[in-house]
């Protein structure tokens, strides 16, 4: 079980728990504002963009090359950006704070 | 070659030049072919604009047959964003349970119907009907309207052998004008009425603007959905084991939808008008101000630099950063609707259909000058066999 904390662009804090699936799925199932997950998680839509809190970046690791290619053209992207459909839920994530980009 | 195989005509040009050239009514087009280049150009709306003369960013060009600006398609930021904000919530309705339930009922009854027939011409008897009926949900208009649209046949804009036909296009334009007048006099809760009542920057949308949105909704969602559905039927005819797999592993349905859309890329490319002398691609091809480029989604989606085995349908492809629905500002507004159609179609076929026999097929080959691309079928006759 991992606890994952989302902070939306309206500064709303949403704490969720999960054991499996992707972080995007968790967010969509719980209606986290700003995460739409239009493509269902195949890394094609960029509607699941989050900024990982810098101090937690080791929990998620950096974006893959394919993610980076997508994020490169997103004006809100920074070095802590991830497409959260590409982050699998695991114990390792426990306590991670994710700022929703949109 | 199997009927459902769609070759990639762009491979060599993509790898060697990064671009292709196409002549079109004395307004030539430089086709951008690589995935990264297509994305970059799509993102850079200042240099590669959509808000040119109406019809010019469409290939073949429609400048000679229309003056109505399609909205939001032929508008650039920041106005583009204002229009998108008005229509986006409406185009997300396909995610609602009630919408999905109605769509499922439509698709199930159509599949039940074709299962009783010996010979089904898929384009006209299945895909066109499915697309037209589903559109009544998107517009929130009475189901019976779909009979009118089905009556137009598959080619509302084109007569036999002719690429563009102004007279035929006017059938659609006249229809939409009449609907807008009707909604202005007797508003309902359909899309026409909602748009007529919408405001942009403190004023009501004009009838001309409403027309621009409605024409686009009809035009953009017609051939694209028809090709996606028809080609998928051909794929399952050639791969009955994939139907069985979707039955056993329903959790891969979403990936299968995205993969089929990547592979078939129902919209081959879309144009932009260049606003300043510049270069496209790492190879640095010059393009001149006031010339046209096109963003070739179909080529980008077979780019081996990103996609492993790009020319195969890998039904459960996990990472699939395709651009079949476009990229950046103008990404497809109808994608939520199209994805729901495909998702429910795959579930329904898996549940009800055991196999499909192709009896006869006539391919639709798009002529892009330097390239000939199979985009779908003019007609394909099949027999659906129940499980
Ligand atoms: C599988 C089906 C579909 C595919 C592959 C597809 C593909 C695309 C692509 C590639 C674009 C980007 C065009 C550009 O960048 O200039 C686009 C835009 C658009 N599509 Fe689709 N489309 C599909 C279905 C639909 C449907 C069902 C509708 C509506 C009923 C629709 C309405 C639109 C609109 C309104 C735009 C313009 C959005 C804008 O400019 O902001 N499409 N589509
Ligand atoms: C008023 C607006 C539009 C008109 C009058 C129009 C007209 C046409 C015509 C004449 C064709 C046949 C081309 C040929 O056979 O050479 C066609 C095909 C097609 N159009 Fe459009 N179009 C419009 C808007 C759009 C938009 C906005 C999209 C997508 C976003 C779109 C997607 C397609 C596709 C995928 C085909 C199929 C190509 C094929 O199957 O051969 N159209 N359209
Ligand atoms: S959900 Fe589409 S890219 Fe993550």
Image (cartoon, helix red, strand yellow):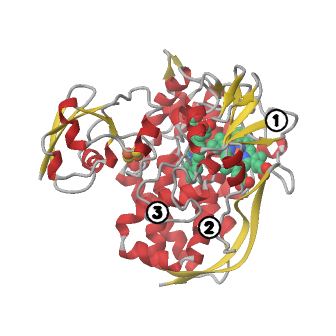
Residue B1 to residue B139: above or below? below
Which comes before the other along the chain, label 2 or label 3? 2
Check the residue under mark 2 and report the chain it is in. B
Density class for disc 1 (Cα within 10 Å; few <14, some 14-19, many ≥20) is some
Q: Are marks 2 and 3 on the same chain?
A: yes
Relative image position of residue B206 (x, y in whole percent): 61, 23
- Which disc number belongs to residue B28? 1
B144 to the left or right of B248: right
B282 to the left or right of B378: left
Mark 3 → mark 1, Cα distance in angstroms = 36 Å
Q: Which residue is mark 3?
A: B256
Q: Which residue is mark 2?
A: B126
Relative image position of residue A43 (x, y in whole percent): 42, 48
User: In this figure, what is the number of numbered marks?
Assistant: 3
Check the residue under mark 3 and report the chain it is in. B
Which comes before the other along the chain, label 2 or label 1? 1
- Which residue is painted at 58% across and 51% down in the image? B301
**Viewer-closest of B121 and B374:** B374
Tell me if I can see residue A101 in this picture: yes
Query: What is the secondary structure assignment of the residue under circle 2?
Result: helix
């Amino acid at each position: 079980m991992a606890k994952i904390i989302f902070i939306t662009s309206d500064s709303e804090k949403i704490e969720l728990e999960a054991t499996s699936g992707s972080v995007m799925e968790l967010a969509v199932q719980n209606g986290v504002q700003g995460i739409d997950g239009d493509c269902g998680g195949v890394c094609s839509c960029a509607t699941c963009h989050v900024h990982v809190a810098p101090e937690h970046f080791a929990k998620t690791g950096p974006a893959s090359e394919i993610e980076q290619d997508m994020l490169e053209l997103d004006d809100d992207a920074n070095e802590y950006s991830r497409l959260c459909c590409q982050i699998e839920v695991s114990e390792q994530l426990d306590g991670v704070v994710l700022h929703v980009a949109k | 070659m199997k009927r459902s195989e769609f070759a990639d005509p762009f491979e060599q040009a993509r790898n060697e030049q990064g671009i292709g050239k196409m002549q079109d009514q004395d307004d030539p087009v430089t086709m951008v072919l690589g995935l990264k280049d297509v994305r970059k150009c799509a993102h850079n709306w200042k240099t590669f604009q959509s808000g040119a003369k109406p019809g010019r960013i469409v290939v073949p060009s429609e400048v000679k047959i229309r003056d109505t600006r399609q909205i939001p398609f032929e508008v650039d930021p920041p106005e583009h964003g204002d229009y998108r904000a008005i229509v986006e919530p409406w185009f997300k309705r396909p995610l609602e349970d009630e919408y999905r339930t109605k769509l499922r009922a439509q698709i199930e009854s159509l599949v039940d119907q074709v299962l009783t027939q010996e010979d089904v011409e898929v384009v006209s008897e299945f895909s066109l009907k499915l697309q037209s009926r589903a559109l009544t949900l998107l517009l929130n208009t009475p189901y019976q309207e779909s009979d009118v649209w089905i009556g137009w046949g598959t080619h509302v804009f084109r007569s036999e052998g002719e690429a563009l036909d102004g007279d035929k296009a006017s059938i659609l334009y006249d229809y939409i004008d009449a609907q807008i007048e009707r909604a202005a006099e007797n508003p309902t809760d359909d899309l026409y009425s909602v748009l007529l009542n919408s405001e942009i920057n403190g004023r009501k949308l004009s009838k001309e603007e409403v027309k621009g949105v409605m024409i686009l909704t009809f035009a953009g969602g017609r051939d694209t959905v028809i090709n996606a559905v028809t080609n998928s039927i051909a794929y399952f005819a050639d791969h009955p084991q994939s139907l069985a797999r979707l039955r056993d592993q329903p959790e891969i349905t979403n990936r299968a939808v995205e993969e089929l859309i990547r592979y078939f890329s129902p919209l081959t490319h879309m144009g932009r008008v260049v606003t300043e002398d510049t270069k496209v691609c790492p190879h640095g091809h010059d393009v001149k101000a006031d010339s046209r480029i096109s963003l070739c989604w179909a080529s980008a989606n077979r780019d081996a630099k990103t996609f492993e085995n790009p020319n195969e349908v890998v039904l459960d492809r996990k990472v699939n950063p395709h651009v079949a629905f476009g990229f950046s500002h103008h990404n497809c507004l109808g994608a939520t609707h199209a994805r729901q159609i495909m998702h429910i179609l795959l579930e329904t076929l898996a549940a009800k259909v055991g196999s499909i026999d192709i009896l006869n097929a006539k391919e639709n080959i798009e002529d892009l000058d330097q390239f000939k691309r199979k985009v779908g079928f003019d007609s394909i006759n099949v027999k659906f066999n129940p499980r």
